[in-house]
Image: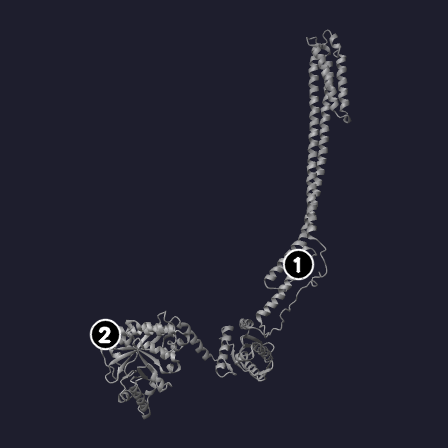
Amino acid sequence: MDGNVPGKASGPVSTAADTGMEGAGRTWSLQREWSRAFLLMLAALLIGAAVTIVGVRGLMDQVQATSAELHLRLDKVEVLRSALDAHEQLGHQMLSNAPGDRSAFLRQQEEISRLFQETAAILPGETGMRDTIATARQSWQEALTAHGLWGGQVQSLQGNHVDESPALAAASAEVRKRVAEIRHYSLLEMDKGLAHNAELEQLLIIGRIALFVVAVGVTVYFRRRMVKDLMRPVESLHKGVQKLRGGNYNHRIEVFRRDELGELAEAFNGMAAAVHNSHLNLTHRATHDPLTRLANRAALMERLTESFGRGSTRRNRSEGLLFIDIDDFKDVNDSLGHERGDDLLVQLAARLQGCVRTHDLVARVGGDEFAIVVMDDDAGSVTAGVAERIHEALRTPFFLGEDRRTVTASMGAAQRRPGTSDAAELLRQADFAMYLAKHGGKARYQLFDAEGYDHMTYRAALKRDLATAVSGGQLRLEYQPIADLNSGEILGVEALVRWQHPTLGLLAPSEFIPLAEETGDIDAVGCWVLDTASRQAAGWRKSLPRCENVWIAINLSTIQLPNPRNLAAIKGILSDPAAQADKVVLEVTETALAGSTDGGVAALKTLKGTGVRVAIDDFGTGYSSLSSLAVLPADILKIDRSFLGRQASEAQSAAMLEGILGLARMLSLEVIAEGVEEPGQLDLLRALDCRMGQGYLLARPGSAEAIKALLASGARLQPGPAALEEAVDS
């Protein structure tokens, strides 16, 4: 029995104190921290990109500047060298007194002087190249002067001085050598510039490597921070959600930091605690009766189902189930009101709990019904002891306001056995036992009776199958002839319904007609029998010789008569000319008519308007008075077979039969004797002048084909071998 109080959680519930966060506000901001981190990473990337761009750009500018300066120097030197070569050739012509343009020679000197000046201007002074170019110019000028080829000397140069040409060539070669040194210096300058550029490149590479190392370090650092501050809390939160979804409402997640994720973790823990409390409340409400605080039907079934689920480990142990119903509880509600009735239920629940052990379960199944699961009760003695204590506890009156009431209870018990399939079956067995106790006189304890239960389930199965008996074409008709006891002539036949059950075989009317009357299926069964039998008899009368006056007797249940719709259906069948209502006899039992209201008599009178006759079946077994018999719309009395027992020849039986026959003559009623099975019975009926009878001595019931053959043969029914079998064989 669950002692939990609704609204109170019995399991561990995490609060702010459990996580150490009570009264502690947020000390970190995840958004601000990671915003700063990403800003730093962005700044590092921008700085690295800027350094790379500026370094590469400077390096390229340096290379381009060095290359441009070198090309300029080399171009000037090349132009100067070419001019020196041309001027030297022209100087050799002048020395050889060959014709030439002396003015052009002087202009070349001026041009070469200008080239020396321009070349000296573009050469760096710190390398000594300017001094070299100045020395070369001076050597060039001195060589020309020494050979009379400088400036104004040219105009006064006369004669052939070819012998001076070698000296001029040597001097010019020296000048060209000095000019070539300028080219060498330029190449050295270029190498120096390239070396400087290599240094810049190394610095750039070192800078980029340093930035890369910083980026890797920052990445590793923030990855660890991400795993610790983001991934681990998120994973813990995800795990918590999965636990919560799986029904583990006690799970709480760890609060790693006091930031947004920490607040989210605290919110989750609070939500989980609220869900846990709500789950406990809902579970308690779903499994407990709000009035008595006892377990309800759902909790009872859960306990029993759990017990059945442990069957493999509890083979030698079983449970008892006690089903309790308060006798005449409706009288308490009607006389004292429902509020006092509820008080009685609450007090009774307390007494029931006092009659059981701590590990037994007391449940309110519904209304005034209770159930007790008695654990570990192999022989049923513990359950019987609980029932005895309950009877003893109920002897003490209940105080309901100002009233005192003593109540009793009907109790049924069932023991779990190896053949018990499930909890629902055990509950049905205990309920059935309680039903037997209730109908056995109340205030009783009844143990489950398997034989009685099987009979009940058999009847329930038949009731269920009856609904489809007519529509499924499962009904069959047999016919028993009714003969003139003196001549043996067949006057009529009685239709007897049978049920060809799909699994149980052919069932007699005594097995299903009472059930059909309980379920209401008697309307469909009765109408089918009436329509089928009346048409069958009409067909015999039309097709067989000497059968024009054979009538058909059909049993009618008085349950069919009060229903206006069913009465109209019966009247519709009889009104059909094909039924030939004047050849139909409706049989109604005396007992049923005696127990019915005037509606049965009125209905029979209505049906007689169609031309049918009415027979009182089983006459003599009821308690109808002569006055009631006089008002019944009867035409025929059928004497019950009980008046034709083995002692029928005795004077008392003969006197009773004679009295019934005399009464019928006085009321102008025909008489049919049922159950004629022995020759002595037939002799007695003939002696008492009973005209008609039926029974196994005359003919047994047969199928429509057998009866048709019997009628076609024109056989007379006489005592002895069955005429029906003889007619069929012939």
**Residue that numbered label 2 is attached to:** 544
User: Residue 145: image x %, image y %?
Assistant: 76, 13
Q: Secondary structure at mark 1?
A: helix
Of the pair 607 and 212, the residue shown nearer to us:
607
Q: What quarter of the picture does the N terminus occupy?
A: bottom right
x and y percentages locating residue 610 in the rendered image: 30, 75
- Against 309, residue 166 (above or below) is above
| Mark 2, other Cα within 10 Å: few <14 / some 14–19 / many ≥20 | some
Q: Is disc 2 placed on a helix, strand or loop?
A: loop
Answer yes or no: is residue 317 visible. Answer: no
Which of pointers 2 and 1 indicates the residue nearer the eye?
2
In this picture, residue 78 sits left or right of residue 445: right
Q: Nearer the viewer, residue 263 or 110?
A: 263
Q: Position of residue 641 (x, y in %)?
A: 33, 85
| Image: 405 above or below 27 | below
Within-10-Å neighbours for mark 1: few <14, some 14–19, many 20+ = many
| Kind of residue sitting beneath label 1 | Ala
Question: Reading the chain from its start, which is encountered first: label 2 or label 1?
Answer: 1
Residue bearing mark 1: 265
Q: Nearer the viewer, residue 197 or 468?
A: 468
Q: Which residue is rendered at x = 23% and y = 84% of the image?
A: 487
Residue shown at 43%/75% (left/top)? 460
Relative side of 494 to 261, left or right: left
- Residue found at the very far top of the displayed protein: 159
Quadrant of residue 233 within the rendered picture = bottom right
- Place of residue 521 in the rendered image (x, y in percent of width and height, measured from the top left): 39, 73
**Is any atom of residue 104 visible in this view?**
yes
Residue at 33% in and 78% down: 605
